[in-house]
Image (tube, rainbow, N blue to C red):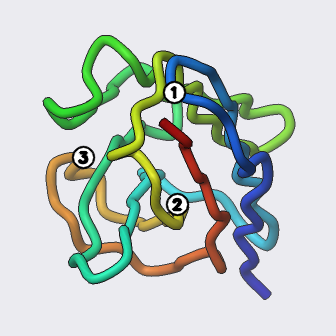
Amino acid sequence: QVQLVESGGGLVQAGGSLRLACAASGRTFNTYGWFRQAPGKEREFVAAISWSGGVRFVTDSVKGRFTISRDNAKNTMYLQMNSLKPEDTAVYYCAAKYNTDITNGQYDFWGQGTQVTVSA
């Protein structure tokens, strides 16, 4: 059974940092991604990474502040979030797929999400 479990969310002041983790179990995938959904808004893509970690992509709004990485030994993906802004407040979801297209937003499996709240 495939499971994706996010952790690391919480409340932080603007300018602060958080590191999210997504532990996968059941199998490995070719592509892993982070998405977020703010209240009243549609879910948006944040970042994606290949299984090897050799290919990474982050959306422009977080470029230079967020870093995506993987630890294959732990089958875990991370999202290091620095210089957080109130507009980063959202539920963050991890996702995984067999497809190797890192720019395609279609994913096969999703986690339950973790809340990130950034106070002004």
Q: Which residue is mark 2?
A: 92
Circle 2 — which element? strand
Residue visible at 21% across and 65% down in the picture = 105
Task: Residue 102: give its label.
Answer: 3
Residue closest to the eye, 24 or 81: 81
Mark number, residue 118:
none
Front residue of this view, candidates 6 and 29 = 6
Report crowding for label 1: few under 14, some 14 to 19, many 20 or more residues within 10 A (C-alpha): some
Q: Which mark is residue 14?
A: 1
Residue 38 quadrant:
bottom left
Choose between 10 and 29: the one closer to the eye: 10
Looking at this rendering, what residue extends furthest in the front direction? 120
Q: Label 2 neighbourhood size at 10 Å, few (<14), some (14-19), many (20+)?
A: many
Picture quarter containing residue 111?
bottom right
Give the mark count: 3
**Percent coordinates x, y for residue 77 in the rendering:** 64, 41
Please tell me which residue is depicted at 52% across the width and 79% down the height of the picture: 109
